[in-house]
Amino acid sequence: MKKILVVGAGCILMTGLLLSCTTQNVAEKKAQAEATRNLGEAYLRQGKYRIALMQLKKAEEMFPSDHILQDDLGLAYLYLKEPDQAILHFKRALELKDNYTPARNNLGNAYAEKKEWDKAIEQYKMVTLDLLYGTPQFPLSNLGVVYYELKEYELSAQYYLKALDINPEFVQALYGLAKTYMEMDRVPDAIVKLQTAVGISPDSAVLHFELARAYALDRQYTKALNAYHKVAEINPSSTLADRALIEARKIKNRK
């Protein structure tokens, strides 16, 4: 009887050791995967999307059940203009953690990239219901973008204004609202929003180009010329600078 008890105790001890080793291995793999994920995220922030994807795929091999990693993979594919692959990973992130709102907002962005506007609207509106989401101006501004694309300008303006109520210096919403106002023949209002945006981001060639366009529509040609020349000054070798100089010549010929 004693021998049987000793053997039984030995089995329990061995099982405990095996479980301990397994838990330790899983923890080590998870830690390695997180470190690799962090490296991939760093490459994402630097705009090195292909290298980022390589690191993130390595992390996925080690620990695929990480909702943050799946969201990062979705972002990498989205930045590489592969929205279908991005959607798979954003959905996987939400399967792993259904209240991970950043992945839901990104899923909306992926649908918007595919011009699947109804699906994008559905995701963005779900994001706006999350009272704990730290940057609600993003889904609100995204809804502004979608309704602008659908030519529903009143709705577009409403959502941009809601975004600006939360963050009055949110340049993306100022820019989008200005474009919407121009479509609504509210050019002076567009100019005010663009002037504010340029004051916040003075080195943005896109903002100066849009401001020049608004000045030209309002027949403020001297200001339009100055703004177009600013575009060329900020980014002289860009396609946008070429367009700005063409528009500037048109104004000079008109005068």
Image (spheres, rainbow, N blue to C red):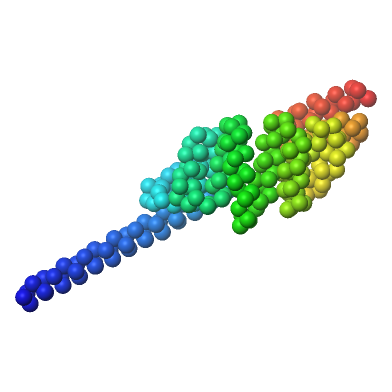
How far from the left and from the top, in percent, is residue 126? 60, 46
Residue visible at 41% across and 51% down? 65
In this view, which residue lies farthest toward the right? 255
Count up the numbered dots.
Answer: 0
How far from the left and from the top, in percent, is residue 26? 34, 58
Asked whether residue 171 is in view, the answer is no
Residue visible at 73% across and 33% down? 152
Residue visible at 11% across and 74% down? 5
**Does 9 sit above or below residue 192?**
below
**Does 168 sit above or below residue 178?**
below
Q: Quadrant of the C terminus?
A: top right
Quarter residue 81 falls in: top right
In the image, 162: left or right of 50? right
How far from the left and from the top, in percent, is residue 233? 78, 38
How far from the left and from the top, in percent, is residue 47? 58, 43
In this view, which residue lies farthest toward the bottom? 2
